[in-house]
Amino acid sequence: MMRHLLQTIVVALLAVQGLGAQGDSTLYLVSYIEAAPASREQVGTLLKQIADNDRRGGAMRAEALQRITEPNQYVILEVWKDQQALAGNSGAAGTRQLRDRLAPMLLAPIDERRCTATMVAPLADGRATVYVVTHIDVPGNSRDAAMQLMRPLLDQSRKDAGNVRFDIVHQLDRTNHFTAIEAWSDQKSQDGHELAPHTRTFRGGITPMLGALYDQRRYKPL
């Protein structure tokens, strides 16, 4: 009985720490969208409608964002209870109609990354004006070492002034491909984070491990 109690406590602690324990079916969807420049405003309007539609369709969270430096590029960040919930919404007539309207205005098909939790905190309320989405690609044999660098970065970054969200997820089919998702109350807070010692330590440690460019993109809510 004591052994069973200890196992229960360990599982609970892992869940609280957001380590993405095995068996967690929560799906994190990161969808990159690139609009034809002439259709930028129409695409932005449609993406807001898609995010609203997906929340009504069961998404626990759905945010449509526009890239700050390249305003014809967007990302939708979504959280779904599981694959079944996502599939149900994707097959709905309203969802298909919105995506059919969107497709002709894009430079390429939507780049959809289906992910699971690596280090994720419970969903919390908070108003963010700046988001940062970073793709971090390391060779498979460097995955564990990369995660050891990520843990102190997340723990300390979540305490930075103005932080609303700081999570890391990884792709279901390529577990050494990570996505860091940050949300900040304002640009000043995000700038301060970039110069913080824990951020510099992480960047210094992760750079030699990278298998591709450290792809960091800044967005604003639509």
Image: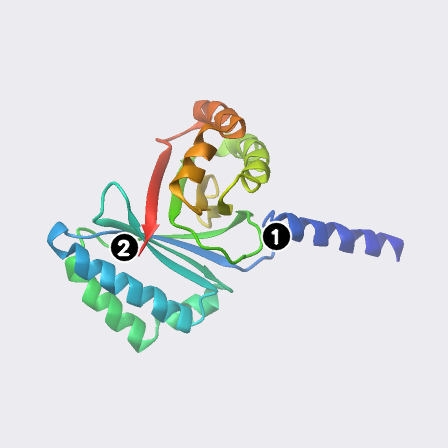
Residue 48, horizontal then vertical, whole percent: 30, 63
Colouring scheme applied when the structure was drawn: rainbow
Residue 104, horizontal then vertical, whole percent: 15, 61
Q: Residue at x 71, y 50 (%)?
A: 13
Label 2 sits on residue: 110
Instruction: Please state if 26 lies on the left or on the right of 70 as rendered.
Output: right
- Rendered-image quadrant of the C terminus: bottom left
Q: Are marks 1 and 2 in contact (CB under 8 Å)?
A: no
Task: Say what secondary structure mark 1 lies in.
Answer: loop
Question: Considering only vertical position in the picture, is 110 above or below 89?
Answer: above
Q: Residue at x 49, y 30 (%)?
A: 199
Dot 1 or dot 2, earlier in sequence: 1
Q: Residue furthest left?
A: 38
In this view, the mark in front (1 or 2): 2
Local crowd size for mark 1, using a 10 Å CA cut-off: few (<14), some (14–19), many (≥20) = few
Q: Residue at x 45, y 71 (%)?
A: 58
